Amino acid sequence: MAVDYAYYSQVYGGGLSEAAFGDSIALAEAHVRWLCSGNRVHVCCAAYKRAVCAACDAFAEFGCGETNGFKLGDFEVRRYAGDDAASGEEMATRAALRELTGTGMAFAGVR
């Protein structure tokens, strides 16, 4: 792993517990590597590490599924296609890309 809990909590300033960090870090790092696919990844680079930390925070907060909607008893509201809401994966992508801006590491190909 490029990021350990000491880096996350002391350098990045993240607020997750060590257990919550441990639950999300592997997914976060894999996601950032995917975002950087096809480009030279500098895993020791501060921007890469910050992107992993940002994605870790997003995955810990939102999971991988939808981020909006609610359920009260039998009543449930889900997001609609036109909503500005996003999935946890999209939130992690946004957070990581903010940290990778200007580095040239983020994937810029056709999806």
Image (cartoon, rainbow, N blue to C red):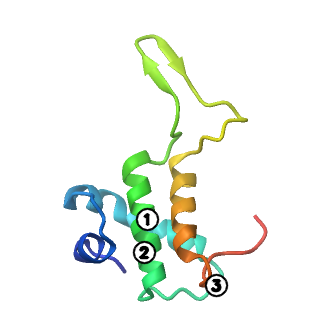
Which sits earlier in the primary sequence, circle 2 or circle 3? 2
Q: Nearer the viewer, residue 104 or 40?
A: 104
Name the mark on residue 106.
Answer: none
- The label number, if any, that marks residue 54 in the structure image: 1
The quadrant of the image that shows the N terminus is bottom left
- Residue 104 image offset from top left, x and y in percent: 64, 84
Tell me where residue 49 sits by quadrant. bottom left
Dot placed on the residue nearer the N-terminal end, 3 or 1 = 1
Q: Is residue 85 above or below residue 11?
A: above
Q: What residue is disc 3 on? A: 104
| Residue 23: quarter of image | bottom left
Could you tell me which secondary element the residue under label 1 belongs to? helix
Residue on which disc 2 sits: 50
Residue occupying the point 45% across, 63% down: 55
Q: Mark 1: give few (<14), some (14-19) or many (20+) Cα within 10 Å.
A: many
- Tags 2 and 3 in contact by the CB under 8 Å rule? no
**Residue in the image at 42% along x and 74% along y:** 50
Amino acid of disc 3: Gly
Amino acid carrying mark 1 in the image:
Ala
Give me the C-alpha separation between circle 3 and circle 1: 18 Å
